Amino acid sequence: MKHKILVTGGLGYIGSHTVVELQSAGYEVIIVDDLSNTRMEVLGKIAQITGTKPHFENFDLVDSELTQKFFDLHPDLSGIIHFAAFKAVGESVENPLKYYRNNIQSLINILENMERLKLSNLVFSSSCTVYGQPDELPVTEQAPRKAALSPYGNTKQISEDIIRDTVVASTIRSISLRYFNPVGAHPSALIGELPLGVPNNLLPFITQTACGIRPQLRVFGSDYNTPDGTAVRDYIHVVDLAQAHLVAVNRLVNNLGKAPYEIFNLGTGNGNSVLEVIQSFEKVSGVKLNYTITDRRPGDVEQVWANTQFANDELGWKAQLSLDEMTLSAWKFQLELNKNNQ
Ligand code: WQD
């Protein structure tokens, strides 16, 4: 009897890579996605990679009635991974209510149905953005959360608190995974980061500039207190990240957790600057990137990278893939997209 896992936002960037890992490990996967930030074709690409097309339902988890109807049809879920959320930092500043409503209400709907049906295992997609600019680096899970720099980041902090308090008052057990900077694409180049519209994030902007979709990359600031003046992040390959979600699901499904609610940093433990990412990309792609240095982007932190000891020790998981493998896989995915004129 296969364990059935609900993956909300499972047609999205990290969600789709995680569905591939879950299916490859023998889990049955159900995806719920409202298609607001992805394309339907991703479902077929997942099937091409794993040979199994996940069950897919297209509806908005903010809709309490539709969500309840869904859960009533699936009272036997062994676990839930909740990715579905809006995630553009800048957009959240312009339209905070859209972010609070979508990111918080969808989580509440899921938790209420878990309580109602006595479902237990929730993996939550959180973010290093909850730390703001940490006082100490590398940053551990015990670091104090700072006031969020954006409504998006605040929805992640509020969501973690909602889960923490619900776990205390119910039989729900949960793991929150705080991602650092997910980048790269599946080695098949069939799935990857699919920015609809102008990319916010660095690597899709690099690959779109390199293939001529964008005229030039702007490097946001070179006057930071870092070795080369550009901001430093802990970039982690999306496949490493997806595999950590499989480990988290296994931990919950097999009741291996040391506490009802656990939080893990998912990074490599290394920091790289924007210029180092550009240099890596130019090396692996053979493409000279057209970029210019501009002012800092408001809300950016100067430097952040993870202390990954807890995840390494407790989950027995450690990121394996290098920055060059991240940038090369992103480039290969971009070339595949261009072939299909996506
Ligand atoms: C990385 C670095 C930019 C674009 C955010 C969220 C985080 C997660 C990932 C959702 C920064 C610089 C970027 C560009 C640039 N979001 N940059 N030119 O801001 O670290 O993290 O996205 O899960 O929660 O906070 O990622 O890729 O936008 O930026 O110079 O055109 O690249 O200034 O230093 P960020 P990013």
Image (cartoon, rainbow, N blue to C red):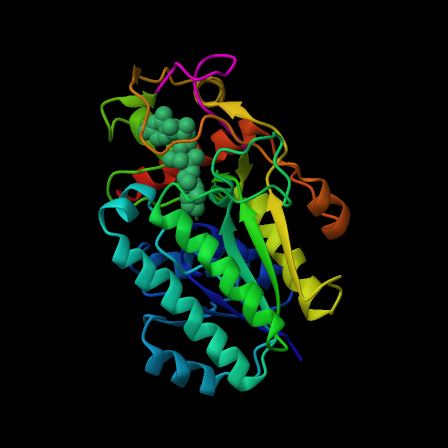
Residue 228 in percent (x, y) is at 47, 12
Toward the viewer: 183 or 100?
100
Q: Residue at x 33, y 46 (%)?
A: 88
Toward the viewer: 162 or 185?
162
Along the horizontal axis of the image, is 248 left or right of 197?
right
Residue 112 in percent (x, y) is at 47, 78
Q: Main secondary structure of the magenta part?
A: loop
Residue 130 in percent (x, y) is at 49, 45
Q: Is residue 75 visible?
A: no
155 versus 167 height, above or below: above
How many labels were placed on the picture?
0
Q: Residue at x 59, y 76 (%)?
A: 169
Q: Any magenta on residue 227?
A: yes
Highlighted range, magenta: 221-234
84 versus 67 height, above or below: above
Give the quarter of the figure containing the N terminus. bottom right
Residue 320 in percent (x, y) is at 66, 37
Give the quarter of the figure containing the C terminus. top left
221 versus 62 height, above or below: above
Q: Residue at x 61, y 28 (%)?
A: 270
Q: Any magenta on residue 137?
A: no
260 versus 137 height, above or below: below
Where is ligand 1, by quadrant?
top left
